[in-house]
Amino acid sequence: ILNKLQQEIMNTEGSFKHYNHNLILAGGFKGKNPKIYIVDHMEVGPIKFNYASVGSGENVSLNHLDEFYASINDPDNLSTREMMENLVKAKIKSSNQSVGVGGNSDIAIYKKGEKPRKIAGNESKLFEEIVELKSQSLVKPRIANKSLDQLIAGEKFESLYPEIFDIELKDDKKNLYLKGYKV
């Protein structure tokens, strides 16, 4: 999987061409042990820790990832959504404490036997907004989880956004919160 990821980021015509000269952290579980690798156009190398973060918000995101990994009783019961949700939470916490952290995250999903997928652009922004609303109890967990699962499955922003914000999130308090207001 990692070699395929490296090939994709080296392919100037591929769907991951924007990452051609960037560092990517790729992670998952090998048995019950978390494994993370650094992947770039030059190399694929293991990280010897259970989690990793890079950039100016590294210290805050590492604290969140430390708490998350410590809370895992059985990694076999973790869903893709739970893992991705915690990556986004780590980024949000870093962004809240460091001016240098921000922007939308592009999330690549690699599963054995499947073609690589990516959540980027509007879908990535919506994913982050749903995670943030859920963590602040501004949307019901069931609705948030369903929407996050739909984004992971490839549902597009245009079909999910109206459903979430026009039907489930009519309360102005939620919109104000997402715009950065204290609620």
Image (cartoon, helix red, strand yellow):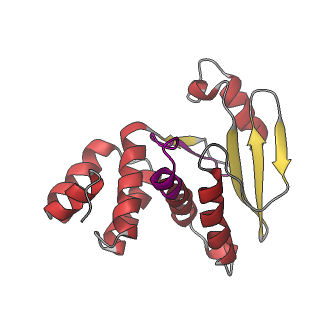
Residue sitting nearer the eye, 13 or 43:
43
Q: Quadrant of residue 144?
A: bottom left
Residue at position x 68%, y 79% from top?
Answer: 74
Q: Is the C terminus in the top left, top right, bottom left or bottom right quadrant?
A: bottom left
Q: What stretch of residues is rendered in magenta?
A: 93-112
Residue sitting nearer the eye, 74 or 136:
136
Residue at position x 30%, y 73% from top?
Answer: 140
Residue 20 makes an appearance in the image: yes
Q: Is residue 152 left or right of residue 56?
A: left
Residue at position x 61%, y 44% from top?
Answer: 56
Residue 146 position (above or below residue 95): below
Residue 2 screen position, x and y as percent: 76, 42
Residue 107, magenta (yes or no)? yes
Residue 77, magenta (yes or no)? no
Residue at position x 67%, y 24% from top?
Answer: 21
Residue 13 screen position, x and y as percent: 59, 18
Pick out the residue farthest to the bottom: 73
Residue 171 screen position, x and y as percent: 15, 65
Q: Is residue 128 left or right of residue 81?
A: left
Residue 31 position (above or below residue 23): below
What kind of secondary structure does the magenta stretch mostly adopt?
loop
Q: Is the N terminus in the top left, top right, bottom left or bottom right quadrant?
A: top right
Residue 112 makes an appearance in the image: no
Q: Quadrant of residue 80?
A: bottom right
Residue 32 screen position, x and y as percent: 77, 71
